[in-house]
Amino acid sequence: MLASKVAKGLANRTINGRATATPPRPEGPHAGAKFVGGGAAFENLAISGTVGVSYGRVTNVTPMARAIRIIEELKLRGRMTSEPALEVYQRVADVVDRESEFRSKYGAKDYEQYWVQAMADALNSGGTMASNFGAADALKIYQIVTRERISTRKVGWKVRTGIGYVFRSFDGVSGSDPALEVVGEYYYPLSNRTQFNETATLNTILDNDNNSYTFRNVMSVTHELDDRFDWENSWTYNYDRNGPTNTNSTVNALSTAFIYSLTSSLDATATYTIARFSGDATIANPNGNDSSMFLGIRYRLK
C-alpha cells in the first residue's frame, strides 16, 4: 500500500536524510537579546533578553511529500513499470529539498530547468521508468513543484524551555520579574495526505507572590482532499490562572477550515470556529458559547 510506504519513507528520511542524520539530542543552550527603538512616542530603548535550552528534533519532511506526489502522478500516467524503491523516493526528495542550492548556483531566472532535470535523473536512476523522460514529464514535475500547494509536513518532537527578562521597557522602567516558558511540540504525518500537529505551551512569572500562569494546547489534523483543497481541523484549549485576583478562565475552541490553493503561496480560506468560555466570568469575557466565521486570503512567505 502506498500509505504504508509513505509512512516508512518519511520515517526513513528522518533517520537517513542528509539534513537529519542524527537522532533527537539536546540542541544546547540558546540565548538572544532584543534592542527596540521607541520612536517618537518614547524616548527610551526597550531591552529584553532570553536564554533557554531544548531537546529533541523536528524535521520538515515536506520535500518527501512532494516526491511522493511526483511519483504518484507519474504512476497514474503509466510512466512507471513498477513501484519504485524507497531509495528513489529519498533521492527525489533530496533534490526537492535543495531548491535554494539550485537557485543560488544557476540564478532565480534559470534554476528551475536544472532543478527539474535533477529530479528526472533521480527518477531514471531507479530503473522503473517506462522510457526516458520527455517534455511532458518535465512539464508535469514543474507544475507540481512550482504551482501545487502541499501543506507543511513535519515529523519528530521537541521540548524547549526558556527564561526571559525585560531590562528596560519603552517607558524607561528597569527591571521586572523573569518569565518562564516551557513548550512541547509533536508532529507526525499520518499518511502522504494527512498531518497531525500538537503544541503545548506553559507561561508563568517567576515570582513567589504571583501564582499566575497560562497553559495553552493546540492540536490539529490537516488532510489534503485533492491537489488544491486542504481540510484542517483543530482543537485549542487555553487555561488562564490569575494569582493576584484568585480567578481562572478556560476556553475550548473547535475550528474547521477549508483551504483552497490559488497559487503555491496564496490561499483562500474559510474557517468556522465554535468556542466555549467557562470559569470566573467578567463583563468582557462572559461564560457560554460563541461562534465565528472567517473568510480570507493568506500569503505564505515560505
Image (cartoon, helix red, strand yellow):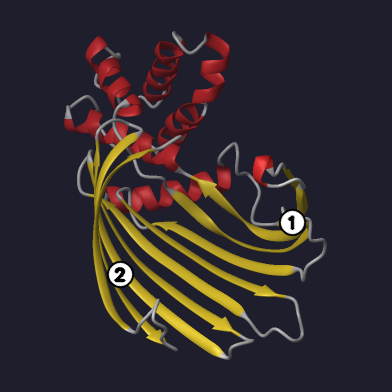
The first of marks 2 and 1 along the sequence is 1
List the single residue furthest toward the bottom.
246
Q: Which residue is mark 2?
A: 254
Residue at point 66% right, 67% down?
A: 181
Residues at marks 2 and 1 touching, judged by CB atoms closer than 8 Å:
no
Q: Nearer the viewer, mark 2 or mark 1?
A: 1
Q: Is residue 290 above or below residue 227?
A: below
Q: Is residue 78 left or right of residue 237?
A: left
Residue at point 77% right, 71% down?
A: 177
Residue at point 41% right, 22% down?
A: 119
Q: Is residue 196 left or right of residue 82?
A: right
Residue 195 at x, y = what percent? 37, 55
Q: Is residue 166 visible?
A: yes
Name the residue nearer the viewer: 187 or 38. 38
Name the residue nearer the viewer: 39 or 298. 39
Name the residue nearer the viewer: 107 or 250. 250
Mark identifier at residue 112: none
Q: Which residue is mark 1?
A: 169
Three-letter residue code for mark 2: Leu
Q: Is residue 206 left or right of residue 283?
A: right
